Image: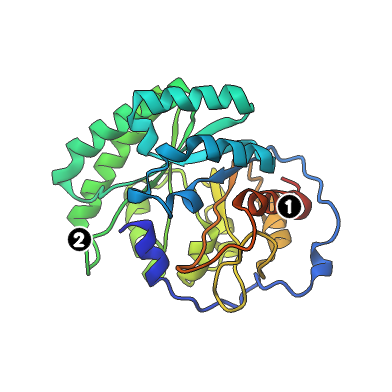
Amino acid sequence: MNRRIFIRNTSLSVLGLSLARTGISNQAGNVKSKRKIIAGAHVWVYASTLPGYDVSSALSRIFSDISYAGFDGVETMEHPLRSAAYTSQIKELIDQYKISLIGSSYSGDMWDKDKHNQIYEDVDMIFTNMASVGGRTFGVSVGEPEGRTKTEKEFDNQAILLKKLISIGEKSGIVLNLHNHTAEVANKMFDLRGTLKRIPDIKLGPDLNWLLRAGINPIDFLREFRKQIVFLHLRDQLNNGKWPESMGEGNVDFKEISDVLTEINFAGDAIIELAHENGFVPTRPLRESLKMSRDYIKKTMGI
């Protein structure tokens, strides 16, 4: 399932849980942290407006905006890393803006054995290109059969391919992590637990907002899987369940999230992934929303 379908079909109800912000006073003051956490931005907010979600044509703007906003690096989607020319352009942009390519997200039907060779060859090529420009993380969404849950055999197939991808990543210095949208964690995390049953120590890169929208308390998730979480996606949310224009304009308590990250000794990458509802009309340039978001997590989370 592609990311736009997730946006269209996701429930907009808000969990009360512990993530509703009770007042701006709870967010005040700078937060100092000794954790080594890299702050980056994901390209989805650009990709969502482009044909096929391919950001290759927008790389210059992306690196310029994300550098302006003060991030340490960029997490791309996989499309430009299939091209030697665009990989070369990424290298030039890294040198120009002095920010890194942290890595890439990736989506594929890992459960479908008939697609294994195609996915393996695709990822192998992406890893080669990504490693050449210093990329080191790979967030995988495993896909889902339409209209049903996976069978035990399909979970077995999925695990076989994931283990192969983990192995080739290790040879390139790239760490694979499981990334979630709603489908992977719906129904009491049926899909995720199906993978963990077969690969108990697989690295995780949860998107805390998709957890929230799937009915999972992100705080509980962070604590339960503390030993294998190496990567995070962060996004704010309003009390009406919709996404605000930038971080800090919603009602998620990121100070509490920061406290839990300290508690579990998280020392990975924290990636802001802005997303806007269908039909949303921006009130400011995107680079300004990115900068507001960067400043906000620096203030509230010390990242």
Look at the picture and state if 76 lies above or below 247: above
Residue 183 visible in this rendered orientation of the protein? no
On the image, the x and y values in percent for residue 89 come to 46, 25
Q: How is the image coloured?
A: rainbow
The vertical placement of 173 against 6, above or below, is: above
Mark 1: which amino acid?
Answer: Met
Q: Would you say 265 lies left or right of 43 here?
A: right
Q: Quadrant of residue 220?
A: bottom right
Q: Amino acid at mark 2?
A: Thr
Nearer to us in this view, 128 or 8: 8
> Which element carries disc 2, helix, strand or loop?
loop
Quarter of the figure with the N terminus:
bottom left
At a point 34% along the width and 28% down the height, the residue shown is 83
Quarter in which the C terminus is drawn: top right
Report x, y in % for residue 65. Answer: 61, 41
Residue 62 appears in which quarter of the rendering? Answer: top right
Give the number of callouts.
Answer: 2
Q: Element under label 1?
A: helix
**Circle 2 Cα neighbour tier, 10 Å, few/some/many (<14 / 14–19 / ≥20):** few
**x and y percent of residue 167 in the render?**
34, 30
| Viewer can see residue 35 | yes
Answer whether labels 2 and 1 touch (C-beta < 8 Å).
no
Left or right: 37 in relation to 118: right
Residue drawn at x 40%, y 47% is 200
- Mark 2, residue position: 151
Q: Is residue 263 left or right of residue 242?
A: right
Whole-percent x, y for residue 2 in the image: 33, 57
Residue 192, by quadrant, is bottom left
Q: Which residue is mark 1?
A: 301
Residue displayed at 37% across by 52% down: 196
Per the rendering, the mark at residue 83 is none
